[in-house]
């Protein structure tokens, strides 16, 4: 069994990869907690990234975390602020709504009964 105490925390792992690589493109697939911690641990990292991509926030005020909050920003808004405040490379943010439109899931079905019954099974087929 792996000893989890000896593992490198993701935020420190980011620091190492960005320091040893040229032109790192970082794609964040969830809340920006580890990216923010990386930037706080080493304030030069944000200038060493080539580009940053992530999905966060919403345009129409309808969320998937709360009524009006998108999950990635809503779960750790302080991290989202820290990243956006410190990042120095080209940054590409995709809001929640284009992600729904891309896979043809209506906002109403996502906001209503995503976790219940037949809709849940249909969404899992995507």
Image (cartoon, grey):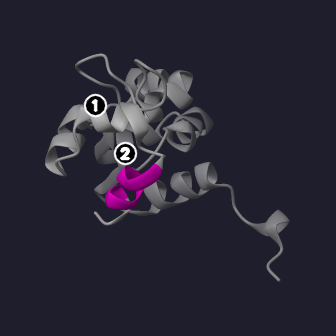
Magenta segment: 117-123
- View extreme (front): residue: 117
- Quarter where residue 97 is shown: top left
Residue denoted by label 2: 48
The mark found on residue 94 in the picture is none
In primary-sequence order, the first of circles 1 and 2 is 2
Can residue 62 be seen at all in this image of the molecule? yes
Judge left or right: residue 1 versus residue 34.
right
Residue depicted at 83% across the width and 74% down the height: 3
The verdict on residue 70 being magenta is no
Residue denoted by label 1: 108
- Quarter where residue 46 is shown: top left
Give the SS element for disc 2: helix
Residue depicted at 46% across the width and 34% down the height: 71
Residue depicted at 52% across the width and 33% down the height: 43
In the rendered view of the protein, which quadrant contains the C terminus?
bottom left
Mark 1 closeness class: few <14, some 14–19, many ≥20 residues within 10 Å: few
- Quarter where residue 60 is shown: top left
Q: Looking at the image, is 104 positioned above or below residue 69? A: below
């Amino acid at each position: 069994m792996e000893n989890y105490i000896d593992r490198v925390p993701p935020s420190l792992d980011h620091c190492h990869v960005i320091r040893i690589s040229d032109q790192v493109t970082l794609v964040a697939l969830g809340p920006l907690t580890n990216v923010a911690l990386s930037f706080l641990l080493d304030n030069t990292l944000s200038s060493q990234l080539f580009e940053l991509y992530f999905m966060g926030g919403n345009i129409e005020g309808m969320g998937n975390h709360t009524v009006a909050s998108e999950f990635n920003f809503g779960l750790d808004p302080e991290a989202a602020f820290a990243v956006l405040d410190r990042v120095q490379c080209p940054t590409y943010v995709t809001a929640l709504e284009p992600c729904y439109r891309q896979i043809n899931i209506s906002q109403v079905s996502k906001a209503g009964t995503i976790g219940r019954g037949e809709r849940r099974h249909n969404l899992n087929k995507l």
